[in-house]
Amino acid sequence: MATERPPTIDPVAAERWHILPATPSPWLHEEVARRMEERLGWIKLKPANWVHWEPLRGGVQAHRLLTQRYPGASCHVIEPTPALLQAARQALSQPWWSPARWRAAPVHFEVPPQASVQMLWANMALHMAVDPQQLIAQWHRLLAVDGFVMFSCLGPDTLRGLRSLYESLGWPAPAHEFTDMHDWGDMLVNAGFAEPVMDMERITLTFASPERLLQELRELGRNLHTQRFAGLRGRQWHRQLREEMSRRLANPQQQGSLGLEFEVIYGHALKPVPRLKVQAQSTVTLDEMRTVLQKNKPGQPQG
């Protein structure tokens, strides 16, 4: 596995995308979050506090599902800019007159202390990160020992039909390359996570027209490919794109509709007790030593 950032993501384009004003969570993101939330039934740990990573794009409705599953757990919401954080506060907060506001566990709109949360939830964010390994390492630092990360992202078979269409016409790719789930598993282990579990599914969305399909793609993200079109295209190009979509993406099961396939990857992994590296001369932080000593007290199970 390569140890460098994905070669097809333009860092400038990625930064611009992340600071764009918030829009309603895309339907696909909300649906993926709903399916991922069902997977929490497999996990016995009930977090006392957790992080919701970028919920404005990841799923506002999903936030409500998570608070219902863990009604007593406090939450830290993280967004990339102060403006987006304020928008998240407005979107996620209960009205002042609602009884649910006073019964609910607190929601903090700030980054929690390191090693302080038992769950980090990140829906459909990782495939848009310019440096995913750095992001995974950040998640690892926020989690307490025995906490877990729960995430989803798009996989490499996403938009196969659209990629084939662009390639046949000699156009640059319509999206950057997405990472395989096995590589995500390797990155989790390299960051210090243990027992990564990865699975995937394919979801086909159908659209009544090319215009509706293009609208959905704009809501889902942007083309961050370094070799994407360098400038704006004209009306003739746009007309050709719509015509080719109508011809090549026609869904044989539903006459008159266009189909687009998405590969969705789900993953979760645990943060284990840190292993002390023994060398001729070793340096161990005080926090690492304290964690190991507390975990290995007499009478406690050994890992």
Image (cartoon, helix red, strand yellow):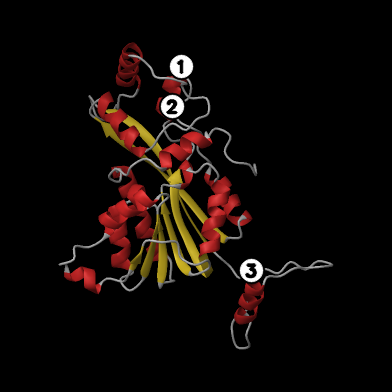
- On-image quarter of the C terminus: bottom right
Q: Position of 51 compared to 132: left or right? A: left
Residue 265 in sight:
no
Identify the element where label 1 is drawn: helix
Three-letter amino acid code of the residue under disc 1? Ser
Mark 1 and mark 2: Cα distance apart in space: 12 Å
Q: Position of 199 compared to 92: left or right? A: right
**Which numbered disc flags the more N-terminal residue, 1 or 2?**
1
Image coordinates of residue 138 in percent, x first then y, are 54, 56
Three-letter amino acid code of the residue under disc 2? Pro
Mark 3 and mark 1: Cα distance apart in space: 50 Å
Q: Which residue is label 3 attached to?
A: 274
Task: Indicate whether 276 appears above or below 63.
Answer: below
> What is the number of the mark on residue 174?
2
Task: Indicate whether 40 appears above or below 185.
Answer: below
- On-image quarter of the N terminus: top right
Residue 129 in sight:
yes
**Which numbered disc flags the more N-terminal residue, 3 or 1?**
1
Identify the element where label 2 is drawn: loop
Image coordinates of residue 25 in percent, x first then y, are 30, 46
Residue found 38% across the figure and 35% down from its top:
261
Image coordinates of residue 20 in percent, x first then y, are 37, 40
Mark 1, other Cα within 10 Å: few <14 / some 14–19 / many ≥20: few
- Residue furthest left in the image: 97
Q: Nearer the viewer, residue 110 or 257?
A: 110
Residue found 46% across the figure and 68% down from its top:
117
- Residue furthest bottom in the image: 299
Of labels 1 and 2, the one closer to you: 2
Residue found 50% across the figure and 52% down from its top:
198
Mark 3 and mark 2: Cα distance apart in space: 42 Å
> What is the number of the mark on residue 168?
1
Three-letter amino acid code of the residue under disc 3? Pro
